[in-house]
């Protein structure tokens, strides 16, 4: 079997690498600078996201009539892989753009597409994903934020949580409870676009374990959402949400992020001596790194399979769950091994004097704990693989 990329795909990858080498500071490319959510970082990030937009990469796969170039989805996958490998800033915005553009292109009407797609393509209008609520995460069908039909608008009341980036976002896409009396639970929700500047929207930032306040609680108090902001058919919000979580779960970043960490660890053990002996001579460390290399290769092939399934317009649900599960758990194993190799230095976070590998592995360890929760927990992925992948009956 030949898994090589075509010449055209390789050329695109080189173009992306050239772009990143020019746009990211050199210490970023070697260390992978952490996201710190300071205003300075955000200014840099905004400029970077705008530059990605200027390359035409956000909209590359879209239909020409909406400003796209109808490029093959493989280019999107390669771009995602490179962004993740180089730890480009604010990749979660990139993901949400993919989700909201898929929502608009597949479910939106012409007016919604013309109004919102150009801002997304430019990399300058930011979106947050308002799915989870205090009582609804794994089970999105339980969303309770109400959208009451008031004639020419919906009156929205309730609370969302874990709305990453809501404090920076201009817009939110969210399934809301529009039809609580519908005969089927799956028909109770509708998908809405909510302007985050609407009166009655309040965002409260939450600090995550790694000390970054980018997770948010979003409160809606008598927020008027115009009727034209309902996306797709009323009562079909759950269906749209399920289509979008498939996009959220699949990505080549799952393989390329650990690859970069492995390469950094290999360099580190080669240049570090303990009691006069190079760490690279330690049999336990060599074995762990070799195992890591195998797992990363497995992950890469799983990720390419997802990209192929997407490129051939097949159902991505089960393979998306596989890569999400394997990739997120792999990241946790990789950084845990990294911590063991760093030994006592693993206690030093970024910015600490004497921190090894810029303290990023320690920070990654804390950040990665959330990977098996965000975008659907590992338990939920296993259920999807069992039911949709293996055809086992639901419990
Ligand atoms: C870093 C981070 C970023 C996030 N960003 C966003 C965002 O931008 N927008 C957004 O909407 N949400 C976001 N989320 C929320 C995320 O999608 C939810 O946390 C996730 O879906 C789990 O939901 P929950 O937290 O409500 O846990 P619950 O659904 O309450 O689950 C609790 C536990 O029960 C288990 N469980 C639940 N149901 C079952 C079942 N049927 N069978 C077996 N076990 C089960 C779960 O696996 C879990 O271990 C983010 C979360 C994190 C950690």
Image (spheres, rainbow, N blue to C red):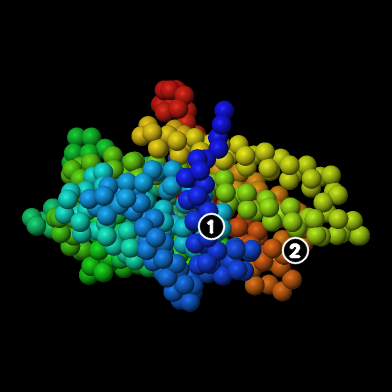
Q: Residues within 10 Å of mark 2 (few under 14, many from 20)?
A: some
Q: Which residue is mark 2?
A: 345
How far apart in space, not on screen, are marks 2 and 1 (Cα)?
Answer: 31 Å
The label on residue 395 is none
Is residue 182 visible from the viewing direction of this image? yes
Residue drawn where x is 32% and y is 46% of the image: 70
Horizontal side of 311 relative to 229 (left or right) equals right
Horizontal side of 18 relative to 229 (left or right) equals right
Q: Residue furthest right?
A: 276
Is residue 147 visible from the viewing direction of this image? no
Decide which of 104, 188 is in the foreground and name it: 104
> Where residue 115 sits in the image (x, y, percent)?
20, 59
Nearest to viewer (mark 2 / mark 1): 1
Residue drawn where x is 41% and y is 53% of the image: 95
> Where residue 395 sits in the image (x, y, percent)?
42, 27
Q: Residue furthest front?
A: 7
> Where residue 230 sits in the image (x, y, percent)?
19, 51
Which of the marked residues, 2 or 1, is nearer the chain's N terminus?
A: 1
Decide which of 324, 186 is in the foreground and name it: 324
Question: Quarter of the image holding residue 205?
Answer: bottom left
> Where residue 183 sits in the image (x, y, percent)?
19, 35
């Amino acid at each position: 079997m030949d898994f090589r990329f075509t010449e055209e795909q390789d050329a695109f990858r080189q173009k992306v690498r050239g772009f990143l080498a020019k746009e990211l500071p050199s210490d970023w490319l070697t260390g992978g600078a952490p996201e710190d959510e300071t205003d300075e970082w955000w200014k840099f990030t905004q400029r970077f996201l705008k530059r990605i937009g200027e390359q035409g990469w956000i909209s590359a796969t879209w239909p020409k009539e909406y400003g796209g170039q109808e490029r093959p989805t493989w280019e999107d996958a390669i771009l995602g892989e490179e962004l993740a490998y180089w730890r480009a800033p604010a990749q979660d915005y990139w993901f949400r753009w993919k989700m909201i553009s898929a929502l608009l292109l597949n479910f939106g009407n012409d007016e919604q597409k013309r109004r919102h797609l150009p801002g997304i393509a430019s990399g300058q209008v930011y979106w947050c994903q308002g799915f989870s609520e205090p009582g609804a995460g794994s089970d999105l069908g339980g969303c309770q934020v109400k959208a009451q039909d008031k004639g020419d608008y919906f009156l929205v009341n309730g609370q969302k949580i874990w709305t990453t980036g809501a404090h920076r976002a201009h817009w939110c896409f969210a399934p809301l409870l529009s039809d609580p009396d519908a005969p089927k639970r799956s028909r109770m929700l509708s998908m809405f676009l909510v302007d985050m500047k609407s009166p009655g929207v309040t965002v409260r930032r939450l600090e995550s374990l790694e000390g970054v306040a980018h997770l948010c609680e979003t409160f809606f108090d008598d927020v008027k959402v115009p009727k034209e902001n309902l996306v797709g058919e009323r009562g079909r919000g759950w269906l749209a949400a399920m289509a979008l979580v498939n996009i959220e779960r699949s990505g080549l970043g799952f393989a390329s992020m650990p690859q970069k960490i492995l390469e950094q660890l290999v360099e580190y053990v080669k240049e570090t001596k303990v009691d006069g002996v190079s760490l690279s001579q330690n049999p336990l460390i060599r074995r762990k790194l070799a195992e890591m290399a195998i797992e990363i290769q497995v992950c890469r092939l799983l990720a390419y399979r997802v990209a192929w399934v997407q490129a051939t317009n097949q159902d991505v649900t089960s393979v998306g769950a596989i890569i999400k599960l394997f990739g997120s758990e792999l990241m946790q194993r990789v950084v845990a091994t990294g911590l063991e190799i760093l030994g006592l230095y693993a206690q030093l976070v970024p910015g600490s004097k004497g921190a090894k590998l810029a303290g990023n592995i320690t920070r990654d360890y804390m950040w990665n704990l959330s990977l098996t929760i965000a975008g659907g927990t590992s338990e939920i992925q296993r259920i999807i693989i069992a039911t949709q992948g293996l055809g086992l009956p639901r419990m």
